[in-house]
Image: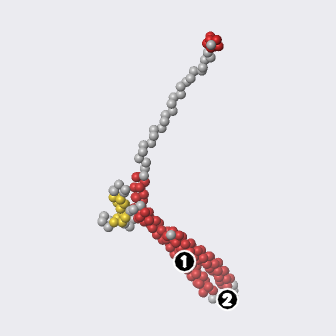
Amino acid sequence: MKKQTAAAVTNAINDKSEEARKDALFEIRSLKKDLAQLEKELSSKKSEIEDPAFDLVHSAFEIFRHTQVMAENRKLTVQIDESLEKASFKDYLDSKGARVLKKPEGWHWISPQGEMHYLGESNETQAAAEKLESLITKRKKPTAKKAAPKKAAPKKETAPKEEPKQEDKKAAEKK
């Protein structure tokens, strides 16, 4: 459920970032037009300026505001991803029976054989999850010995069958 909620929030944040990007691009185009207009007015001999300074400053501020929203949204999605990853490590530890103890302090896991293993400090869930996974995979290795590969039996060379001698043939016919 956590992943679904995080995905929905991340999608909403990405949509807002996309809107901010489009708005920033619109403001950049508007600023280009305003700058071109200001250049025309300043290069003409009439020099009639229609107060473009406000439009320039406003466009620049809007570009800044939209890009700031995009940057903040990027930071938020990174934080959500990190939190989700930490939660998944904690869920893994909990599902395998690991616990955070106060004395001795840190993540500990008691194996089915009754051995207590120290996995790491209480604030290092990722390292503890990795250590637990390595302990579990070591225990699950097959203990049965593999059968020795069979060696191919040497082929016996068979001599070509000789035809029975003519005398044997005649004796067999008489019987």
Q: Secondary structure at mark 2?
A: loop
Between 9 and 114, which is closer to the camera in this rendering? Answer: 114
Between 52 and 162, which is closer to the camera in this rendering? Answer: 162
Q: Position of residue 51 (x, y in %)?
A: 63, 88
Q: Position of residue 175 (x, y in %)?
A: 62, 13
**How far apart are the alpha carbons under marks 2 and 1?**
37 Å
Q: Position of residue 116 (x, y in %)?
A: 33, 58
Seen in the picture, residue 108 relative to 7 is either above or below; the reply is: above
Q: Is residue 129 left or right of residue 8?
A: left
Residue matched to label 2: 48
Asked if the residue under mark 1 is in contact with the one under mark 2, i.e. CB atoms within 8 Å, the reply is: no
The residue shown at (55%, 74%) is 13
The residue shown at (37%, 56%) is 112
Seen in the picture, residue 8 relative to 59 is either above or below; the reply is: above
Numbered circle sitting on residue 105: none
Q: Is residue 99 left or right of residue 162?
A: left
Seen in the picture, residue 127 relative to 65 is either above or below; the reply is: above
Q: Residue furthest toward the front?
A: 175
Q: Is residue 1 left or right of residue 172?
A: left
Residue 34, can we see it? yes
Sooner in the amino-acid sequence: mark 2 or mark 1: 2
Amino acid on which the number 2 mark rests in the picture: Glu
How many numbered circles are shown?
Answer: 2
**Label 1 CA crowd tier, 10 Å (few <14, some 14–19, many 20+):** some
Residue matched to label 1: 69
Q: Residue furthest toward the top?
A: 167
Amino acid on which the number 1 mark rests in the picture: Val
The colour style of the image is secondary structure
Q: Secondary structure at mark 1?
A: helix
Residue 121, can we see it? no
